[in-house]
Image (tube, coloured by chain):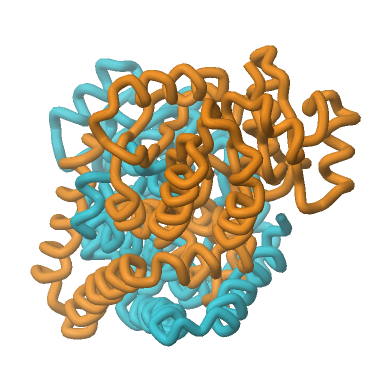
Chain colours: A orange, B cyan
Amino acid sequence: MVVGIAGLGLIGGSLAKAYERSGATVYGYDGNRVVQDFAKLQGVLAGDLDEKTIGECELLLVALYPEVTMEYLKKMAPHIPGTTLVMDCCGVKQEVCKVGFELAQRYGFTFVGGHPMAGTQYSGFANSKADMFDGAPMVIVPPQADDILLLDKIKKLLTPAGFSHLTVTTAEHHDEMIAYTSQMCHVISNAYVKSPRAQMHKGYSAGSYMDLTRVAWLNEHMWTDLFLENRTFLLQELDQMIGSLQEYREALEQGNGDRLCTLLAEGRICKEKVDGQ
Amino acid sequence: MVVGIAGLGLIGGSLAKAYERSGATVYGYDGNRVVQDFAKLQGVLAGDLDEKTIGECELLLVALYPEVTMEYLKKMAPHIPGTTLVMDCCGVKQEVCKVGFELAQRYGFTFVGGHPMAGTQYSGFANSKADMFDGAPMVIVPPQADDILLLDKIKKLLTPAGFSHLTVTTAEHHDEMIAYTSQMCHVISNAYVKSPRAQMHKGYSAGSYMDLTRVAWLNEHMWTDLFLENRTFLLQELDQMIGSLQEYREALEQGNGDRLCTLLAEGRICKEKVDGQ
């Protein structure tokens, strides 16, 4: 298999390493030439991904920031053959899928939105690893939901990355879900660690603190872009969360133990219902 | 060593198993007679902790709910010898230490507030384990901060439980810190999982969601008591958190990327400063 990977950060770098591990020929591109050359030196890349080598790729994975992904797709579209499956890896899907689907129709290739559901609080090629996606879910946004042949092709092309299963959805539903499952975690973690008590936590903290502050250490530029692109859904979740916290606050201020206990039981039941114990 | 343990839930059960593991003679008591008998059958307890056997204990650890701990201490105080070190395990310290210090003075034993900084989202003797506290911090609230001989005695008596180090502080400072490092984590997790999107998270979630919802599954009765006893400090943290979230909300609603990026960078720096990368 010949795979092109644009963007060799945490996600793109991990994908490159996973495909290289599987025996695929991987061409890569990164905005930072040093990273691209380093990936070649390491043997992860067989060569540069450019206007020429892109023509050999059965699969093109674009793991750049959302805005840069769209620019890259526009620039490279004329060079992408009709046989290539193009997939982005952005954390928000509505805008990028709109652009991707339009370009695909115009230039004759196939575009599918993608969001690999893994990662760490670290970024960059240096932190990427071949097994990053082993057992992780992959969300995909195909142009049509019922194109079984295409879904089968996607599954085969993504197999070397190690995903445990594919979630097929629309760009809108993806963005609504991701505002909650991922973006809010980052906002909450980042907000939580701002308490003055955070700076004195050592000796007074255990697993809960570490879990809750893990993703506070984030790349603020990337997340700002992602948040702005998903503004409506993220605002909905922020309002939901602030509203919930205010309910606990009110019960506590009133010293209303019954109400507080009910609020906590409601949350416990939500967790129990969806994840069991 | 002879140790008495009152309350055989997750914390008390784990302590009992740890001391038993170290070769100590452990007497135990639980409000639920079935649990107490089960612990004896399992060989964790050498016998019942009662008005008689309490007289043999060098160390008495009370791991009951805060209100029940205070009742238990009042009831048992006349039977506790002057040589015994009594320590509670409550998640809030101001009230219980006040009661404990007064009883100690009146009856001649030594009381020290304690809070083992470990646990899981599960509760009960069935989930307790001997290595629960291996490597965990233990916060202690001695009657005087500078009684080196007492601190040395505490350290020796607690060694079999496996703690990595002792944090010595006042009841008030403990409660202020714990409102942030532990109580807020539970409120936030419990509030976060109430979004309607939580019930559809599967296939769209990864580590961040799992980390953030882990402690949503809590014992609402225990936590209600703990929250009410620490009302002032917890309200302070809730206001801090709601205020922070509202700042992100405002920047997002205004589509103010610079402001959003600054807010996220501030959080990232807080995390970096105290925990490194």
Observer-nearest of A240 and B18? A240
Percent x, y for residue A4?
A: 67, 32
Name the residue rendered at 73%, 58% in the picture.
B276
Name the residue rendered at 64%, 27% in the picture.
A57
Vertical comparison of B18 with A77: above or below: above
The reply to whether residue B253 is in sight is yes
Residue A20 located left or right of residue B158: right
Specify the quadrant of the image occupied by residue A63: top right
Percent x, y for residue A170?
A: 29, 46
Percent x, y for residue A104?
A: 47, 43
Name the residue rendered at 55%, 69% in the picture.
A224
Quarter that holds the C terminus of chain B: bottom right
Percent x, y for residue B65?
A: 26, 55
Name the residue rendered at 17%, 84% in the picture.
A254
Observer-nearest of A72 and B259? A72
Specify the quadrant of the image occupied by residue A249: bottom left
Vertical comparison of B49 with A234: above or below: above
Residue A120 located left or right of residue B231: right
Residue B147 located left or right of residue A170: right
